[in-house]
Image (spheres, rainbow, N blue to C red):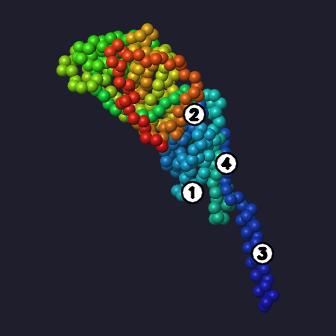
């Protein structure tokens, strides 16, 4: 009997050892990766991936949540599938001018359940998820702009509404016509403010249309005190308010679109913000030869404004050469207008 018992124990031990060896030999994880190129600048691709909302659907039954960031290098996320299964994803980005190389690495730990380690089912599922992620990234990039905003110096501020008197106007989109429109509007406003004993302030141009060949605007000046009782040729209203992207621009009218507006539009699309009104505050005299050369440009935006500078870090001062600054001058020899920044506050720090 002892011999039989010993043989039985030995058989069980051998079976256990064999099963253990098989378990160790089976893979403990599934890892897959793919590398491809997107026709968008690095800053754009990074910002779009980094700003992905939590539990974003990638495809039916698969959601993704960003878990870690390394500025303009990598984005890590957690992908959930089949209800409670999860995989770790790392997007590694490499910029090459107007294009970005994207490597997607997916890792799924199989756990201790032997059933999870057998067969190719899980391997095929991860391959399908990887392909879905590649399709999703391409679709996200297609929703952005091609302009590179990595050299844009900007900040997020809060604008407070101010009462102002303004003229409704429009010009064609030519730089000369826009400059002439600002000059004519300023001359009219000077007369209106003088006749109402109002102190001149920095002019503000609020965009109302940018369609076809037409630039529509409300051009005005903020005022303090009681609203004038009689208004002829001008209207009274309030300047735009809310969270805003602010850019200080020094340069001529003919380069402002490519230097600022195209880049801010690209920034907004990449960081999933919603664009509201945009406007300019003139820090110098729009009637001077050649027009204004010193302005602040604002875009009122909604969305996750607190994290915009994390997703799309502003360019550091000195990172790229800026146009030569022009000394501000008052609109007239009368008292110097109060500076526009007094009506805004910086966004809360991270």
Examine the image and state in which quarter residue 1 appears.
bottom right
Cβ atoms at labels 1 and 2 below 8 Å apart = no
Closer to the eye: label 1 or 2: 2
Q: Nearer the viewer, residue 155 or 329?
A: 329
Alpha carbon separation for disc pair 1 and 2:
32 Å
**Sequence-wise first label, 1 or 2:** 2
Q: Which residue is mark 2?
A: 43
Which numbered tag is attached to residue 14?
A: 3
Cα–Cα span, label 1 and label 3: 34 Å
Please report contact status of discs 3 and 4: CB closer than 8 Å, yes or no. Answer: no
Crowdedness near tag 1: few (<14), some (14–19) or many (≥20) residues, C-alpha within 10 Å: few
Read off the residue under disc 4: 32
Query: What whole-number distance in Å separates the C-alpha atoms at marks 2 and 3?
Result: 59 Å
Rendered position, 146 above or below 114: above
- Say what secondary structure mark 1 lies in: strand
In the image: residue 297, left or right of residue 64:
left
Task: List x then y, in percent, for residue 47.
Answer: 54, 37
Q: Earlier in the sequence, mark 3 or mark 4?
A: 3
Specify which label sits upstream in the sequence, 2 or 3: 3
Disc 4 vs disc 2: Cβ atoms closer than 8 Å?
no
Query: What percent of the width, then of the height, locates residue 220?
Result: 32, 20
Q: Nearer the viewer, mark 4 or mark 2?
A: 2
Of the pair 266 and 197, the residue shown nearer to us: 197
Query: Helix or strand or loop: what does disc 4 sit on?
Result: strand
* Of the image marks 4 and 1, the number of the one nearer the N terminus: 4
x then y, percent, for residue 127? 64, 48
Spot the residue most to the top: 289
Mark pair 4, 2: CA separation = 25 Å
**Residue at image point 56% right, 51% down:** 78
Answer whether residue 334 is visible to the viewer in this image: yes
Kindly identify which numbered label has been placed on residue 85. 1
């Amino acid at each position: 009997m002892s011999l039989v018992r010993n043989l039985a124990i030995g058989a069980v031990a051998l079976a256990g050892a064999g099963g253990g060896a098989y378990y160790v030999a089976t893979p403990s994880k599934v890892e897959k990766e793919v590398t491809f190129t997107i026709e968008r600048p690095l800053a754009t691709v990074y910002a779009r991936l980094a700003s992905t909302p939590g539990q974003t659907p990638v495809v039916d039954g698969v959601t993704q949540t960003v878990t870690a960031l390394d500025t303009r290098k990598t984005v890590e996320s957690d992908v959930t599938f089949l209800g409670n299964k999860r995989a770790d994803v790392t997007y590694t980005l490499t910029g090459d001018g107007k294009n970005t190389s994207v490597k997607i690495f997916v890792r799924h730990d199989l756990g201790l359940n032997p059933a999870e380690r057998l067969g190719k089912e899980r391997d095929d599922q991860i391959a399908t998820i990887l392909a879905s992620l590649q399709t999703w990234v391409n679709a996200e990039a297609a929703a952005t702009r091609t302009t590179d905003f990595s050299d844009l110096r900007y900040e997020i501020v809060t604008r407070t509404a101010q009462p102002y008197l303004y003229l409704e106007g429009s010009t064609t989109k030519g730089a000369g016509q826009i400059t002439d429109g600002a000059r004519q509007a300023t001359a009219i406003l000077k007369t209106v403010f003088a006749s109402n004993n109002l102190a001149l302030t920095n002019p503000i141009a609020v965009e109302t249309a940018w369609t076809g060949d037409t630039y529509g605007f409300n051009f005005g000046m903020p005022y303090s005190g009681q609203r004038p009782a009689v208004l002829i040729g001008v209207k009274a209203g309030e300047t735009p308010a809310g969270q805003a992207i602010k850019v200080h621009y020094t340069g001529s009218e003919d380069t402002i679109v490519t230097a600022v507006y195209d880049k801010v539009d690209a920034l907004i699309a990449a960081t999933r913000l919603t664009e509201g009104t945009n406007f300019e505050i003139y820090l110098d005299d729009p009637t001077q030869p050649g027009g204004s050369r010193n302005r602040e440009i604002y875009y009122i935006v909604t969305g996750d404004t607190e994290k915009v500078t994390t997703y799309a870090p502003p360019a550091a001062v000195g990172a790229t050469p800026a146009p030569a600054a022009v000394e501000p001058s008052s609109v007239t020899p009368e008292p110097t207008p109060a500076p526009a920044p007094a009506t805004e506050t910086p966004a809360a720090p991270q």
